[in-house]
Image (cartoon, helix red, strand yellow):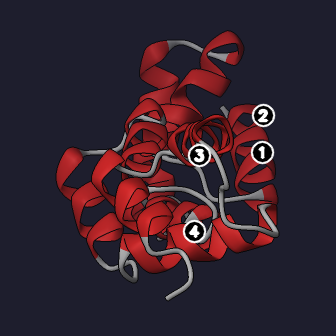
Amino acid sequence: MNELRRKAIGLLARREHSRAELARKLAADGTDEDIANVLAQLESEGLLSDARAAAAYVRAHGARFGAARLRQDLRSRGLDPAVVAAEVGELPSELERARAVWSKKFAAVPEDAKEWARQARFLQSRGFATDVIRRLLKDVDA
């Protein structure tokens, strides 16, 4: 159990992990009961927190991705939907973030339908909503 705890603390030292993520990474090293005990102990000591893991992820990736992508990434890390909604809801407007991502990637306003579609696909792959993409590319000069 000490070895399991040591590995968990090592993983947490690198970056914040959700409880589910950490359990998945420790699965090969111990029984379910031992893992649950170590995770409970880490939570009670304040070393493991789903809210902190969500906040760290959003802080690191919020400027580059849209709300849909952030929500999906956080859910795939095993975070509670309420925690995900709270963290994603605190971000600046999606249009502002999309405009910042667009301006870093593209130097010019789309001049034809092919270029418009290419820019829209890029923003969509980053998880920005379709209506935000349309609004941005319609009045990109603003």
Marks 2 and 1, how far apart at CA: 5 Å
Q: Residues within 10 Å of mark 1 (few under 14, many from 20)?
A: few
Q: Which residue is mark 3?
A: 116
Contact check, label 2 and label 1, Cβ < 8 Å: yes
Q: Which residue is mark 1?
A: 6
Q: Which quadrant of the view contains residue 60?
A: bottom right
Amino acid type, mark 4 = Ala
Residue at the spot x=24%, y=68% of the render?
86
Which residue is outermost to the front? 112
Mark in the foreground, 3 or 2: 3
Residue at the spot x=42%, y=20% of the render?
33
Mark in the foreground, 1 or 3: 3
Mark in the foreground, 3 or 4: 3
Residue at the spot x=52%, y=40% of the render?
38
Q: Which residue is mark 2?
A: 3
Place of residue 5 in the rendered image (x, y in percent of width and height, measured from the top left): 68, 42
Relative to residue 137, is residue 84 drawn left or right?
left
The answer to which of 101 and 59 lies nearer the viewer is 101
Q: Earlier in the sequence, mark 3 or mark 2?
A: 2
Numbered tag placed on residue 56 in the rendering: 4
Contact check, label 1 and label 3, Cβ < 8 Å: no
129 relative to 117, above or below = below
Q: Residues within 10 Å of mark 4 (few under 14, many from 20)?
A: some
Residue at the spot x=45%, y=33% of the render?
20
Contact check, label 2 and label 4, Cβ < 8 Å: no
82 relative to 45, above or below = above
Amino acid type, mark 1 = Arg
Marks 1 and 3, how far apart at CA: 51 Å
Marks 3 and 4, how far apart at CA: 33 Å
Marks 2 and 4, how far apart at CA: 26 Å
Contact check, label 3 and label 2, Cβ < 8 Å: no
Q: Secondary structure at mark 2?
A: helix
